[in-house]
Image (cartoon, helix red, strand yellow):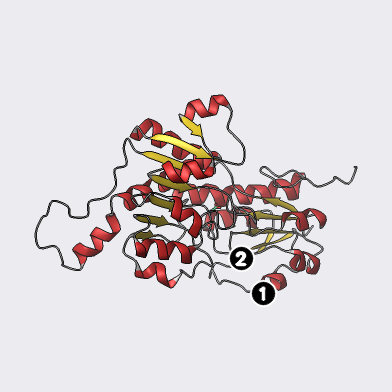
Amino acid sequence: MSKPSILVARAIFPEVLQSLAQKFEVESNQADEVWSAQELTRRMQGKVGALTTGSERIDAALLQANPQLKIVANMAVGYNNFDVPAMTAAGVLASNTPDVLTETTADFGFALLMATARRITESEHYLRADLWKKWSYDMFAGAEVHGSTIGIIGMGRIGQGIARRAAHGFGMNVIYHNRSRLSAELEAQCKATYVGKQELLQTADHVMLVVPYSAESHHTIGAAELAQMKPTATLVNIARGGIVDDAALAKALAAGQIAAAGLDVFEGEPAVHPDLLKVPNVVLTPHIASSTVKTRLAMAQLAADNLVAYLTQGQALTPLNRLPSAAE
Ligand code: GLV
């Protein structure tokens, strides 16, 4: 019997590809070309499953051109590249990779917060440019991290990981804003206090964004919100491009309206707003918050396991939608 065909849309760990090849006929992309929507749709022809990253858009047009498709497994926890209602309507299962990246991503959020508050990138550039000629009392004086107030917007698994690090490791006062309040037990574990968005922006010394991207969360931080923040505050975005209005942020940073920002995600990435490249008080990283070897391998393996579990047993491990079964 011939094996079912799947598409692995971007380069992944060879060992994960090899394990998929034992069960499936695999078309891969180890050259890691970034395909256009048309090319992705064409490559999807004849495939019952696909492994994607957050860069591949799965929408109604692609689904309509590929009625044979049964599952798309995203190698990411965020899934704003999926039109989930269209996938459900087309009978296509969607899955993501939660949990395996939570602590690694929270570590990175903290790293970016530290680098931003303590001006690590800016001062390293200064040193590399051979500008360091003497010690001085206020050289790259930054913002205090320990004992300060962190305001976390989006209190899912990663937000909670950041809260635990902040409260237990750095003695920070943790305030958060989220669509829904955490249980009293989780609030106690995270030592976190629920506040309104305005209070968070006005009170926090460091604002951390960990909210999923949706039409509702688009530009959660824009000019009006930046104007409410303290002039000494920092802003960190490890969530998704589009949560922050990058043009407004570049203006606020240039004007000293807030002290600094740390950004791992950008509107329209991999393009970065040119004005952000001009301001010194921003730390910029290329969407690497989950990127440790161990975690990226776990993410690839979980995406592959979702494909295998669904295509061989009809049940994905971490599904995002529920499809009516043939019997229903
Ligand atoms: C990365 O951004 C992810 O959503 O996993």
The alpha-carbon separation of the residues under discs 2 and 1 comes to 13 Å
Q: Position of residue 9 (x, y in %)?
A: 62, 64
Residue 303: x percent and y percent?
62, 51
What residue is drawn where x is 45% and y is 47%? Answer: 208
**Residue type, label 1:** Glu
Q: Position of residue 291 (x, y in %)?
A: 45, 53
**What residue sits 47% from the left and 42% below the top?**
200
Residue at horizontal 51%, vertical 47%?
210
Front residue of 119 and 81: 119
The C terminus, quarter of image = top right
Q: State the mark number for residue 28.
A: 2
Q: Is residue 149 above or below residue 267?
A: above
Badge nearest the viewer, 2 or 1: 1
From the image, tell me which residue sits under label 1: 39
Q: Badges 2 and 1: C-beta atoms under 8 Å apart?
A: no
The answer to whether mark 2 is within 8 Å of ligand 1 is no
> Toward the viewer: 130 or 75?
130
Q: Is residue 70 something one can see in this rendering?
A: no
Q: Earlier in the sequence, mark 2 or mark 1?
A: 2
Q: What percent of the width, then of the height, locates residue 87?
A: 76, 56
Q: Residue at x 43, y 35 (%)?
A: 174
Question: What is the three-letter code of the residue carrying label 2?
Answer: Ser
